[in-house]
Amino acid sequence: MLAWLRDWRHRRILARTRLDARLWQEVVADLPLLAGLAAEEERRLQALALLFLHDKTLEPVAGLELDQAMRLRIACLAALPVLNLGLDWYRNWYSVIVYPSGFLARRHHVDEAEVVHEYTEELVGEAWERGPVLLSWEEVEASGRLDGFNVVIHELAHKLDMLNGPPNGLPPLHRDMRLQDWSQAFSAAYADMNRRLDAGEETEVDPYAAEDPAEFFAVISEYFFELPQLVAGTYPDVYAQLRAFYRQDPLQRLEQAERGGLLSL
């Protein structure tokens, strides 16, 4: 869509959308993750959240009912990674399916003898290529607490990764970013995690990040927004690449919030 036409459409949608200011403040106040946003950033986050709710269908299943506050919470968490990128980065998918809690997914695996094994796996989130995002509400409610866990950011990082094909830990980079810099930073950090886990060491980042490069990107994106000081201290080159990719500096933002007495890191 042409930029001017997209912007015109967005302005029309926002002009017709009514939002309870008190509800917005309640949702934001319950997300320490958003502390330190400048007034203009919060206005932009609100606009992106409302546009997200307009463009994506949120579908509660298994008896769950989503009220306006719950929908807005999901939308806020979804809007944060694209705060300085825009909703076009969430193109070509249209729905978010929300379960009350963890849900079962049927899997199959073909071994080296070409025997098919079927099994079920309990999940708290999943992103389908060319399909919906699946979330557990329990985990959505637990996200945004500055503890390194954020199921919404995790699954939407996968969606960003899928913009240029199957997820592999390499989303489309901006023109001012170098593929070599990204690859070196992420390869070194991924190798370090696997080496330490193989040696029986504890790691600062959730070991699930060592599953494969796609999961490393999704998990480290959670930490980038939730515990930026940990990423910057453990893998500074990865932090620099994520800062360039997301066009944000959560560490600076949260440190400013701490100095302003808005939170305690």
Image: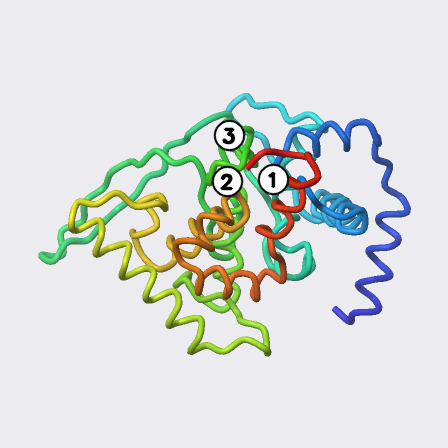
Position of residue 261 measured from the top left corner of the image (x, y, whole percent): 68, 34
**On the rendered structure, is 202 left or right of 213?**
left
Could you tell me how far apart the alpha carbons at marks 2 and 3 are, in whole angstroms? Answer: 16 Å
Circle 3: element type: strand
Could you tell me how far apart the alpha carbons at marks 1 and 3 are, in whole angstroms? Answer: 23 Å
Q: Residue at x 13, y 56 (%)?
A: 114
Pointers 2 and 1 in contact (C-beta within 8 Å): yes
**Residue identified by numbered label 2:** 150
**Residue identified by numbered label 3:** 99
Viewer-proximal residue among 227 and 20: 227
Position of residue 240 measured from the top left corner of the image (x, y, whole percent): 51, 64
Q: Amino acid at mark 1?
A: Leu
Q: Amino acid at mark 2?
A: Asn
The N terminus lies in which quarter of the figure? bottom right
**On the rendered structure, is 26 left or right of 152?**
right
Q: Residue at x 80, y 46 (%)?
A: 39
Pointers 2 and 3 in contact (C-beta within 8 Å): no
